[in-house]
Image (cartoon, grey):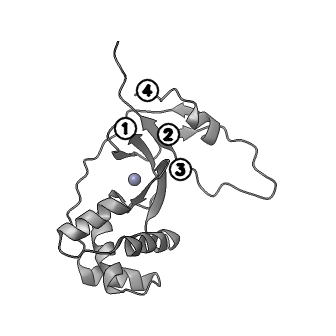
Amino acid sequence: MAIPDDGAYTRNRGHIVAVREPKLASETAEARMCRDDAAALLRKIGINPTAQRIEIASVLLARPQHLCADELRQVLARTGTPVSKATVYNTLGLFAREGLVRELFVDSGKVVYDSNTTCHDHIYDVDTGVLTDIEPGTVAVEALPTLPAGTRVEGIDVVIRISRVQRA
Ligand SMILES: [Zn+2]
């Protein structure tokens, strides 16, 4: 797989030394976690399990997946529990702050919520908008810039942006 030649990765994240062929996962979004389980999970991490939070958690946390706020709203509406845009955004922000989901800034103006909070990187296809997991340990970051005094690396999220190669 070719690294996009736009320099974004090396400017922002250091230097990629090894990228092996990623394993790609297919994405669909209709599964639901049982509402009682979703409520219990919210309570466990100290989030008040309101009806709408339970609906959102039951869709988002049903399995490892990436959903943006609009996609999540569409799934909720399709499955008979429409939730307002403001509530979806507020709830996703809360879930991200509490570590229930990972917030990924994949492109300017596009935020995706990942129900898999374990350490892993991503490939983002700018042509299709599809975000795919990369197996942990596949991307190696060898060099980092000098950090401001008194700081440490909290985490490194790699998003490799790809697009179709235009043939002449
Ligand atoms: Zn992911």
Distance of mark 4 from mark 1, alpha carbons? Answer: 11 Å
The residue mark sitting in front, 1 or 3, is 3
Image x and y of residue 65, in percent: 32, 57
The reply to whether the C-beta atoms of the residues labelled 2 and 1 are less than 8 Å apart is: no
Against 55, residue 43 (above or below) is below
Give the residue drawn at x 41%, y 41%: 123
Image x and y of residue 76, in percent: 25, 70
- Per the image, the residue denoted by label 2 is 139
Image x and y of residue 8, in percent: 57, 35
Q: Say whether residue 102 is left or right of residue 147.
A: left
Image x and y of residue 35, in percent: 25, 81
Distance of mark 4 from mark 2, alpha carbons? Answer: 13 Å
Crowding around mark 1 (Cα neighbors within 10 Å: few <14, some 14 to 19, many 20+) is some
Q: Say whether residue 30 is left or right of residue 84.
A: left
Closer to the chain start, of discs 2 and 1, is 1
Which amino acid, mark 2?
Val
The residue mark sitting in front, 4 or 2, is 4
Q: What's the mark number on residue 2?
A: 4
Closer to the chain start, of discs 1 and 3, is 1
Residue 53 found in image quarter: bottom left
Crowding around mark 2 (Cα neighbors within 10 Å: few <14, some 14 to 19, many 20+) is some
Crowding around mark 4 (Cα neighbors within 10 Å: few <14, some 14 to 19, many 20+) is few
- Per the image, the residue denoted by label 3 is 157
Closer to the chain start, of discs 4 and 1, is 4
Which amino acid, mark 4?
Ala
